[in-house]
Amino acid sequence: MRRLGYDPPPMTDVRTRFAPSPTGYLHLGSARTALYNWAFARRHGGKFILRIEDTDRERSTRESEEAVLEGLRWLGLDWDEGPFRQSENAQRHREVVEQLLAQNKAYRCACTRESLELRKQASVDAGGRGVYDGHCRELDLGPDCGPHTVRLRLPPDGMLGFRDAVFGPSGQDASQIGDAIIQRSDGSPLFHLAVVVDDIDMGISHVIRGADHHPNTPFQIALYQALEVEPPTFAHIPLTIAESGKKLSKRRDNVSIQQFQEEGYLAAALVNWIVRLGWSHGDEEIFALDDIRRLFDLESVGRSAARAEIAKLQWLDQHYIKQLSMNELLQQARPHFERVAERPVEDTPELRKLLDLLRERSKTLVEMAELAHWYLRDEIEYQEKAVKKHLRGSALTVMRALLERMSEAEEWSEEVLEGIFHDVAAALGDLKMGKLAQPIRVAVTGGHSSPGIFETLVVLGEKRTIQRIGQAIELIERRDAVATDD
Ligand code: GLU
């Protein structure tokens, strides 16, 4: 056993862990905890361990566990040991409780729930803290005392202190906590006991976790003392909050990593955004996983809650989308493109050109796929406003002239198309380019925003362009004929 005391362990044997309770998805806050633990272990050449805290049997299905693992893999956070399951250690937890009982560091408590409630209320009414009053502390109850819990015998007073790597000196007086339960009457361990025993058994050197666990730590320190093990270094990281400053809410906010993935964010952007929720390194904003594993430190984790600003994430995502190699971009964008296309999307020079054009103007891959709808689908959706403004009777002459020239084009290139547009503009009385480009853009994409018109037409290809312009001309003719009939 290690020496009792509060000196942080030497950094030569860093072992961190991520200990999620599976909920069916990887929560944004949990992902940050995982990332910080991963980064700290990597920075110090240590080990990162995964432990699934599956003691809530109902919520801890294999599927919900797998969702957490999938999220970690997608973010690129690899672990060295595990996943272990807390439930597998149940026997060990019971043994430790037995050991504490044998050493008189814990005792059985046969107080009923009702009597505890009454006494707690009386204590609160008298201005007390409502902590356990020590009723069974000296009764020396044996295993045959009927239904009972087991409580840790805390020192009667004295500080249960620790030095938090983020919050600094922390702790609470033992008398304010009271002898809390470590084993339920059904023999199952309480969270604190399971966490401390598992952390000891796994040789965890640094416990990096959400600040919601900061108030739990003094009691855990008492457990370390009872077990005569030097506690690990604790680092509690401030909570992540919504942009509004309120608590993140599952209903209101996106808190699931899988959902961010579905919304078309790159893992690299998400990791970069998450690491900056509470950690900084000078004025720098861009951190790839490799930078994070090289630079991450606990000293630069802030103490105030971090706001999850989506605009920042979008900015980062755009940054990473622009950086990707064409092959990577294609690979990342393809599933999103196929969802819009509702069929497999072929790798063609036109598709690659389109990706290059759209990456300049897309904040996410989903946005990119939506901007590419006119390429991906055979049936285009006309936007009503754009049709009203640009597909008018007065555009027919221009459209017919362009269609005629395009049908005769010997080559389908930007230069040739530009030549055709200039000729037609000149022939029809020196028209401005917009007068030609906008109706054609609406005809081939359904809307009035797309990359440059010549690039758009080249990407779409000769056949589809000609078919769509013909279709738009028919649409105008039919509509105007109906209008005249009226
Ligand atoms: N399973 C706990 C949670 O998901 C974490 C426990 C710990 O990190 O000590 O909040």
Image: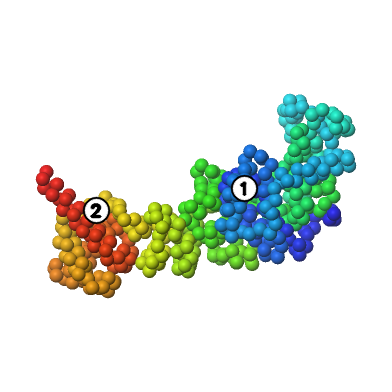
Residue 295 placed where, x, y %? 63, 66
Q: Which badge, 1 or 2, comes first in the chain's sequence?
A: 1
Colour basis: rainbow
Residue type, mark 2 in image: Val
Mark closer to the observer (1, 2): 1
The part of the image, by quadrant, that contains residue 178 is: top right
* Mark seen at residue 387: 2
Report which residue position mark 1 lands on. Answer: 65
Q: Residue, x 67% and y 48% (percent of image)?
A: 52
Residue 377 placed where, x, y %? 34, 56
Instruction: Tell me: 73 left or right of 443.
Output: right
Count residues near mark 1 (Cα–Cα under 10 Å), then give few for <14, some for 14-19, many for 20+.
many
Residue 381 placed where, x, y %? 30, 52
Question: Disc 1 on helix, strand or loop?
Answer: helix
Instruction: Tell me: 363 left or right of 467.
Output: right
Residue 420 placed where, x, y %? 21, 71
Count residues near mark 2 (Cα–Cα under 10 Å), then give few for <14, some for 14-19, many for 20+.
some
Instruction: Tell me: 323 left or right of 142.
Output: left
Q: Residue, x 61% and y 59% (percent of image)?
A: 77
Residue 402 in sight here:
no
The part of the image, by quadrant, that contains residue 165 is: bottom right
Q: Residue, x 62% and y 45% (percent of image)?
A: 62
